[in-house]
DNA sequence: AGAGGCTGTCATAAG
DNA sequence: TACTTATGACAGCCT
């Protein structure tokens, strides 16, 4: 493209040579999505002018927005200051804002900031921020309450000093690094925040001062802008917290404590856990409360208001998720989504792709095209399998027969559309076939097809006859029973491939070919032993056609076809075979056939049906054989496993017996009678009762020792 | 030339 | 009873 800049002459009217060159180059670059206007100087200038105008408009809009935002901020700041000065007094020494003794009235709410649904969100945000940021210190410059350490990513990595009696509430971002040593759980079972109710103000201040000193000493340099933003953030936090609580602010710790209690007892804000969750999100107080739930936090969802939840990641919903992300972006929320972006959004709906509504992707830049591919990995994957559009073009005649593409004007559709639309016609076949009866081969399409253009098998049918197919040797060489290659070869060989599939897979609850495992897969569920053929379409016929246009042999099917012609029967063999019973009977009744014709028609139909039945039968047989083989393998492995288990159990039993015997001998030989002599093993034995006690029992005792005279037995404990 | 596999067809039973 | 489906058996063709 850089060359073009040099080629285009400076004058406005290019000469003919230039135009020719432009034409050639444009043709070369058309696959890159470069429009012809690029080469037209005037057109390009005009486009540039339009772009500049749009850009200016956009800038103007942005300026207005910024202005409105600044106004809002200023108004809020003034309100805050007024309210602070009304309800707080500033400590002269420390610069700290100390609340007055009276009950603090809530400040007039800023309707643009705190309205209804935003309140709860706002509450949790403030709580978390306040508790996380500790108590305010007065900024010596502004006199406002400010914080010395802020929610800065830098802060999360600062070693947190942990005073012995003060539990520093950790930012969620740092929770993983510094676990809270003493989690408190509220009534709802959520982990609550730890506060310091036993501390008075001075203690608090001391603790905070300690912390802040260390923070200040270790904190990274903060820019004035950051500092201002933090002050802003805290001011609002402080103000809104007090507003909402309406507390008599006797001291800061009480306020925090009470606010904590309120948080724990108030509806949706009852969970400190939720507060923590909120902290994890980048919340701008005056932004929309639309929040995306943290994927790891179930409770956060209760805080979502007016949020568009991501739809479940089910069918083709990558894009929905993408849309939600887009909704979250401030650009989108403020209506500044660029038209081009919107176009992209609209043009890359996966549903449209799958529903054969062709998205206009031809206008995409390569980057856009790539991104849309990323959104739809399935589609892109299938497209990427073809290395280029030219490859796709080359493959098309192989993948789809001419008949399939009949009526589809590829030139009008454009290459991209063709690529994306490869599947819908085929799927349509499948859908229609699936709605047919189990064994019915002929779809309405096929019938129409046969009537209008003649059966594709006409003249090519027969058990040994050929099928006229322009397939390359490579394609037709694919095994008939190779599930992996089936679709390809079948698409090549038989125009009604999916019908065939449906036919032969109906009886045995087959899974689709697309989900078939490899032929070596021992899981019988994935076996594919189908015979997906049309009546009269012999896979061998396809093989036979390698390099031949004329069939070598004339099979029975072809013979039938000839006889149909000879008998002047106005139907094709396929029609005769595949027509539903009602239609077939209608035809037979409406046409006045002679006996010979009727007999031929019935024979053809019977043979055709039987042929399909034979296919199904063989398929079933193969399925059964494979299934039985699999079952046999499984049973053999089960048997081996059980043998192994039995061996192990026997071994353990032997070992236990040996141990038991040794223990028995040891105990028995350690026993002595009243004379100090060992017992005779032939006359006595040890027995254990149900309660675990061990008895020495004379050999002639056959019943349980508990039932006999205690004189004849000696009770022993388990351990002597 | 023979073996083995695949397919179409027939006969028959069953639904 | 007619039709369809399932299946064993057989024959032809191909590799």
Image (tube, coloured by chain):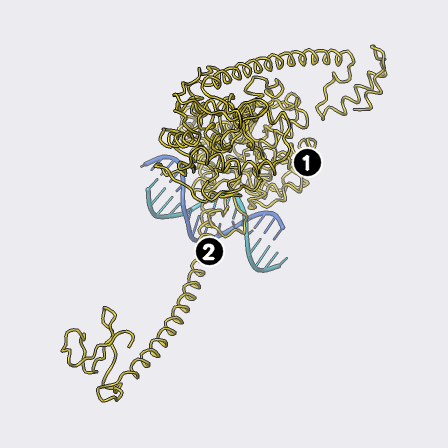
Chain colours: A yellow, B cyan, C blue
Q: Nearer the viewer, residue A481 or A53?
A: A53
At x 39%, y 21%, the residue is A102
Residue bearing the label numbered 2: A629
Q: Nearer the viewer, residue A226 or A369?
A: A226
What number is the disc on residue A328? none
Image check: A664 left or right of A441? left
Sequence-first disc among 2 and 1: 1
- The residue positioned 42% from the left and 25% from the top of the image is A120
Badge 2: residue crowd in 10 Å (few <14, some 14–19, many ≥20): some
Q: Position of residue A585 (x, y in %)?
A: 40, 28
- Left or right, A402 with respect to A257, comes to right
What is the x, y in percent for residue A650? Answer: 38, 71
Q: Is residue A40 above or below residue A550?
A: above
Q: Nearer the viewer, residue A683 or A65?
A: A65
Residue placed furthest toward the front: A93
Please tell me which residue lies in front, A580 or A260: A260
Q: Position of residue A641 (x, y in %)?
A: 43, 63
Asked if residue A160 is positioned above or below residue A595 in the image, the reply reads below
Confirm whether residue A450 shows in the render.
Answer: no
Task: Label 1, secondary structure: give it.
Answer: loop
Label 1 sits on residue: A387
Image quarter where the N terminus of chain A lies is top right
Q: Are marks 2 and 1 on the same chain?
A: yes
Q: Is A497 left or right of A701, judged from the image as shown? A: right
Label 1 resides on the chain identified as A
Chain letter for the residue marked with disc 2 in the picture = A
**Disc 2 to disc 1, how far (Cα)?**
41 Å
Nearest to the eye among marks 2 and 1: give it: 1
Residue A658 visible here = yes
With respect to residue A294, does C11 lie above or below?
below
* Badge 2 element: helix
Does residue A690 appear left or right of residue A550 in this picture?
left
């Amino acid at each position: 493209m850089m060359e073009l800049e040099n080629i285009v002459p400076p004058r406005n009217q290019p000469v003919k040579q230039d135009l020719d060159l432009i034409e050639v180059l444009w043709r070369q670059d058309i696959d890159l999505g470069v429009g012809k206007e690029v080469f037209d100087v005037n057109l390009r200038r005009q486009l540039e002018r339009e772009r500049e105008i749009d850009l200016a408009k956009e800038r103007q809009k942005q300026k207005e927005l910024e202005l409105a935002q600044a106004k809002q901020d200023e108004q809020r700041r003034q309100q805050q200051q007024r309210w602070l000065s009304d309800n707080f007094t500033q400590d002269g020494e420390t610069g700290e804002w100390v609340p007055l003794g009276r009950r603090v009235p809530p400040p007039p709410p800023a309707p643009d900031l705190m309205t209804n649904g935003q309140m709860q969100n706002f509450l949790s945000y403030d709580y978390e921020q306040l508790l996380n940021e500790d108590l305010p210190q007065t900024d010596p410059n502004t006199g406002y309450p400010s914080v010395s350490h802020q929610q800065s990513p830098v802060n999360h990595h600062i070693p947190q000093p942990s005073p012995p009696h003060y539990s520093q509430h950790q930012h969620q971002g740092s929770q993983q690094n510094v676990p809270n040593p003493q989690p408190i759980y509220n009534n709802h079972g959520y982990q609550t925040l730890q506060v310091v109710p036993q501390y008075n103000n001075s203690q608090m201040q001391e603790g905070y001062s300690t912390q802040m000193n260390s923070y200040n000493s270790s904190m990274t340099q903060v820019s004035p802008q950051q500092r201002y933003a933090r002050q802003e953030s805290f001011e609002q936090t402080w103000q809104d917290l007090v507003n909402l609580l309406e507390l008599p602010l006797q001291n800061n710790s009480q306020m925090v404590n009470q606010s904590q209690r309120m948080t724990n007892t108030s509806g949706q804000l009852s969970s400190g856990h939720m507060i923590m969750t909120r902290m994890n999100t980048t919340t701008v107080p005056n932004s929309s409360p639309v929040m995306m739930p943290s994927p790891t936090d179930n409770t956060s969802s209760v805080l979502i208001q007016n949020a568009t939840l991501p739809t479940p990641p089910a069918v083709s919903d990558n894009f929905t998720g993408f849309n939600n992300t887009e909704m979250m972006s401030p650009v989108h929320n403020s209506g500044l989504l660029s038209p081009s972006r919107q176009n992209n959004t609209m043009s890359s709906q996966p549903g449209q792709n799958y529903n054969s509504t062709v998205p206009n992707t031809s206008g995409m830049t390569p980057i856009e095209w790539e991104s849309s591919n990323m959104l739809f990995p399935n589609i892109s994957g299938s497209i990427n399998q073809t290395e280029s559009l030219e490859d796709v073009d080359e493959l098309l005649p192989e993948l789809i027969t001419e008949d399939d593409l009949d009526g589809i004007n590829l030139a009008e559709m454009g290459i991209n559309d063709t690529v994306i639309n490869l599947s819908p016609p085929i799927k349509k076949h499948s859908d229609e076939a699936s709605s047919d009866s189990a064994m019915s081969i002929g779809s309405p399409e096929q019938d129409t097809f046969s009537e209008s253009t003649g059966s594709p098998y006409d003249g090519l049918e027969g058990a040994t006859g050929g099928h006229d197919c322009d397939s390359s040797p490579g394609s037709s060489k694919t095994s008939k029973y190779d599930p992996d290659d089936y679709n390809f070869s079948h698409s090549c060989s038989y125009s009604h491939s999916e019908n065939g599939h449906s036919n032969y897979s109906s009886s045995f609850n087959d899974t689709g070919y697309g989900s078939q495992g490899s032929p070596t897969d021992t899981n019988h569920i994935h076996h594919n032993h189908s015979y997906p053929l049309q009546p009269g379409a012999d896979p061998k016929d396809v093989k036979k056609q390698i390099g031949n246009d004329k069939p070598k042999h004339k099979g029975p099917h072809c013979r039938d076809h000839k006889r149909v012609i000879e008998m002047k029967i106005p139907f094709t063999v396929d029609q005769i075979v595949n027509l539903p019973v009602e239609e077939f009977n209608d035809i037979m009744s409406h046409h006045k056939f002679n006996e010979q014709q009727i007999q031929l028609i019935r024979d053809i139909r019977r043979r055709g049906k039987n042929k399909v039945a034979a296919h199904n039968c063989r398929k079933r047989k193969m399925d059964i054989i494979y299934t039985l083989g699999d079952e046999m393998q499984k049973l053999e492995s089960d048997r081996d496993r059980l043998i192994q288990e039995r061996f192990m159990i026997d071994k353990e039993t032997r070992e236990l017996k040996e141990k038991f015997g040794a223990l028995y001998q040891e105990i028995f030989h350690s026993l002595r009678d009243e004379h100090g002599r060992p017992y005779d093993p032939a006359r006595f034995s040890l027995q254990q009762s149900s309660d675990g006690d061990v008895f020495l029992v004379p050999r002639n005792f056959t019943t349980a020792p508990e039932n006999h005279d205690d004189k004849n037995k000696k009770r022993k404990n388990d351990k002597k």
